[in-house]
Amino acid sequence: MHNFLPYAWFQGSCVPFKEARVSIATHALHYGTGAFGGMRAIPDPENENCVLLFRADKHAKRLSQSAKLLLTDLSQQNVTDALIKVIKANSPTKPIYLRPFVYTSDLGIAPRLHNIETDFFIYGLELGDYLSPDGVSCRFSSWARQQDCSLPLRGKISGAYITSSLSKTEAVMSGYDESLLMNNRGKVCEASGMNLFIVRDDILITPGVDQDILEGITRSSVMEIAHNMGIKVIERAVDKTELFIADEVFLTGTAAKITPIRKIESTTLSSKRPVMDSLRERLTLITEGRDPAYSKWITRVDLNDE
């Protein structure tokens, strides 16, 4: 049961969530011609009249870029302004997840992106841990990650998530929590909706942007934090066998935050994760607005500010 926020951004204004409705003939529903974002916000632990939004600028920029891939214009500023209005309208008292979505709102039946109406909405829901913070079990999916030459993978295009959906269900129905996707070159890409990191000999390694991954915002944040903590970070292709012998393996994402992998298929991984633990602790401090060094990553929304 989802606890949706009472107000959503729909057709240019905040409206009750139950009134934000689209037609069954909506183009994006049929052809996957939409792009979405996902971001977290939490009530300020030190100020009940303030909500902290993590990396709003990066999320808004990526959604604006995703809109360009759909041949539509959605400015970063418009996304940011709407996000702030939604937060103020809802005044959340618990951690929330926000889902902005730009899409072809036209009611036509032709699969196209030219001469077509588009729109933008935002809704939200209360969200705690998306995955168990104690760790998840994973299996390698029989489905391969798409290639950037067939889908614009640098955007969160809604139609691309059929592969994520198939792989996630395959994993869960075969007794695992998550799936791990490989690309057409046999290299490990990411999970169903999260980026992947491994640690070997105190070096943090993650598949590079040339491996058909989504350029995750939590991913880039973790890499920057690690670098500033003196942890060596390498982006490169990752082989399947490396995951079984790695010192640590974990996932990152807006919903998942930083989640360890405790088991891959029949192999149980080490429960000692000093690198991941230090990164997760630091990220928590940052998202709660308690690390001045990263204050620029936090947008503070004053609920009393008109």
Image: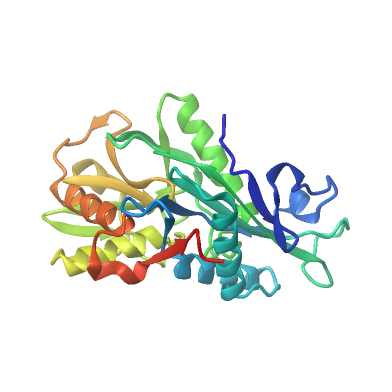
Q: Nearer the viewer, residue 99 or 7?
A: 7
Q: Nearer the viewer, residue 82 or 241?
A: 82
Residue 286 lies left or right of residue 39; in this view the side is left
Q: Nearer the viewer, residue 189 or 12?
A: 12
In the rendered image, the quadrant that contains the C terminus is bottom right
Residue 293 place in picture, x, y as percent = 23, 70
Q: Is residue 225 above or below residue 283?
A: below
Residue 23 place in picture, x, y as percent = 83, 48
The answer to whether residue 235 is seen in the rendering is no
Residue 267 place in picture, x, y as percent = 25, 31
Residue 175 lies left or right of residue 65; in this view the side is left
Residue 19 lies left or right of residue 258; in this view the side is right
Instruction: Identify the residue shown where x is 88% and y is 55%.
Output: 109
Q: Quadrant of residue 288?
A: bottom left
Q: Is residue 139 above or below residue 65?
A: above
Q: Quadrant of residue 213?
A: bottom left
Q: Quadrant of residue 265?
A: top left
The answer to whether residue 22 is seen in the rendering is yes
Instruction: Identify the residue shown where x is 45% and y is 69%.
Output: 58
Instruction: Identify the residue shown where x is 15% and y is 65%.
Output: 229
Residue 186 place in picture, x, y as percent = 40, 52
Q: Nearer the viewer, residue 113 or 281?
A: 281
Q: Is residue 83 above or below residue 179?
A: below
In the rendered image, the quadrant that contains the N terminus is top right
Q: Report the colour scheme.
A: rainbow
Total marks shown come to 0
- Residue at the far right in the pictured view: 108
Residue 116 lies left or right of residue 214; in this view the side is right
Instruction: Identify the residue shown where x is 31% and y is 68%.
Output: 295
